[in-house]
Amino acid sequence: MTAKTVDVLLVGAGAMSSTLAMLLKQLDPSLKIAVVERLKNVAKESTDGWNNAGTGHAAYCELNYTPQNDQGDVDISKALSINAAFELSLQLWSYLVNKSVLPAPSNFINRTPHLSFVWGEQNVAFLRKRYELLSAHHLFEGMEYSEDPAVLEKWMPLVMEGRDPNEPVAATFMSRGSDVDFGSLARYMMEHLSQQDGFELILHHDVEDLQRSKDGGWSVLVEDRGTNDKTRIQAGFVFLGAGGGALPLLQKSGIEESKGYGGFPVSGQWLVCTDTSIADRHLAKVYGKAAIGAPPMSVPHLDTRVINGQKALLFGPFAGFTTKFLKRGSILDLPASIRGNNLMPMMSVGVNNMDLTRYLISEVFQSDGARIESLREYFPNAKDEDWSLADAGMRVQIIKKDEKGKGKLEFGTEIVASADGSIASLLGASPGASTAVAAMVDVIEKCFKDRLENDGWKEKLKIMIPSYGESLIDNENLLKGIRENTLSTLELNA
Ligand SMILES: Cc1cc2nc3c(=O)[nH]c(=O)nc-3n(C[C@H](O)[C@H](O)[C@H](O)COP(=O)(O)OP(=O)(O)OC[C@H]3O[C@@H](n4cnc5c(N)ncnc54)[C@H](O)[C@@H]3O)c2cc1C
């Protein structure tokens, strides 16, 4: 068995590892970094074009980020933090475009207005309240609201044509929304990194196991999927950016912090229309309200997509139940992840989420006709023959122990790191690739504290992400200056 040594080993070549590798290499070009990816290409799981919706999640249109309680109050705190987190991504991408590390922005991000659209008196009242609260905050300045069908028709003709004129409707419109081709973005980053000294991208290799080394780092067992040859890589720091594959590896690490976590995979499908004569009539991401019992990421939406420069429309997602943790994973992934320490949380999540179970079963058994009917709620004149069904990626939701030792299902993301900062992992899938920069800065703060304080990394981060260390939620002037630059660099202005 051969062996090699690196400072940093990243498992998986998706949005998360490519972002972390880029940040680290910019912070210290002398770092020896390796990325190990089981597939033959970069970013072919959740990060790839059609495997996700490509929404630059900024909470402009996603109604699940502004929940309403039984008293009718709308809570916007989550929307503020997601919007501020997305601003960090826009800053890093702008910095990389300005340095010519990334190509012209239209290769990976395109201005696509974000709209929330509802019908029915109760939903209209909710959207009005949401708009009043959000538009009063500087992060959401510029948001428009209308209940006038003629205005809505200008914003989204396909959604309004053929609709009952007597139905109360309302929408919010945010011009600076975006569609992001996260797959292309990750590949550009990896392409640049691969040209740097001390960086190695190891494709078609599986990380099989990992153990603590005596010196405090990790010994990682890697198998060549072509030849079955094994290699041991010694790494000072390991990041498990393996998407759905992160939980099994985290469990193999045996770190105390991994105990009690389980995963609940939800697969997805889209209806896709590649007819440009239709796609050209819709420039928007139109998000509606989720069905009762639906997980928050199943909010239906009709989206403009630009993938590899090609324009198309997407509608969905239609959720499904699976036991695979990755699109190209194994049906044994879920059963193999059951441990003594997560059995109780996993069982109690199963018992206490019957709404979700019923919803997933109904989605799985949905006919093609029923899917088209759902599409017609957003695009009344849609024709069956223009749309085809495509498989999306997999999202493994986090199950963790609650205060009572039972289980709760979480729909966010979480960084799980060892106390000594030698290993970190990203679990969960929402808001996802949009907030990869905030998540990876979090990894750096947890695992490279010393270097941040003593090696000038804080100052370097501030050059890449000018708002680093400050709150964009509280500091209006800072936000305004930064946003002016990022929107102009990334060509997101109307
Ligand atoms: C249906 C759907 C819609 C979504 N919509 C959006 C959206 O609109 N906006 C948004 O921001 N996010 C969205 N997301 C979430 C987003 O796609 C993910 O959060 C993001 O792509 C995760 O990136 P990642 O690098 O963690 O994982 P991935 O892209 O899945 O990459 C993980 C990589 O690790 C590799 N790997 C796994 N195990 C091993 C191993 N043992 N050894 C070596 N390599 C391994 C895999 O092959 C894979 O390439 C969506 C996701 C889904 C499924």
Image (spheres, rainbow, N blue to C red):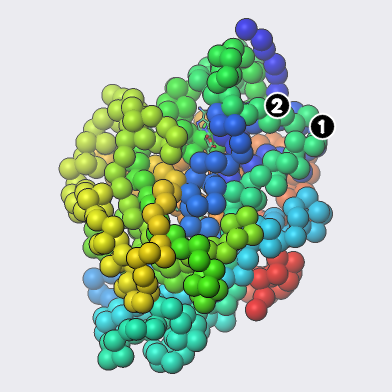
Residue 117 x/y as whole percent: 39, 77
- Picture residue at 63% right of the left edge, 55% below the top: 308
Percent x, y of residue 217: 62, 21
Please indicate whether residue 229 sits to the left or right of residue 327 in the image: right
In the image as oriented, which residue stretches furthest toward the front?
Answer: 385
Q: Nearer the viewer, residue 266 or 249?
A: 266
Q: CA distance from mark 1 to mark 2?
A: 13 Å
Residue 453, percent from left and from top: 72, 42
Mark 1 crowd level (few <14, some 14–19, many ≥20, 10 Å Cα): few
Using the rendered view, name the quadrant where residue 355 is placed.
bottom left
**Residue type for callout 2:** Asp
Side of 62 relative to 227 (left or right): left
Q: Which residue is mark 1?
A: 197
Looking at the picture, tell me which residue is in the foreground, 26 or 299. Answer: 299
Q: Decide which of tag 1 and tag 2 comes sooner along the chain.
A: 2
Mark 2: give few (<14), some (14-19) or many (20+) Cα within 10 Å: some
Residue at the disc numbered 2: 7
Quadrant of the image occupied by residue 287: bottom left
Residue located at (38% from left, 64% from top): 385
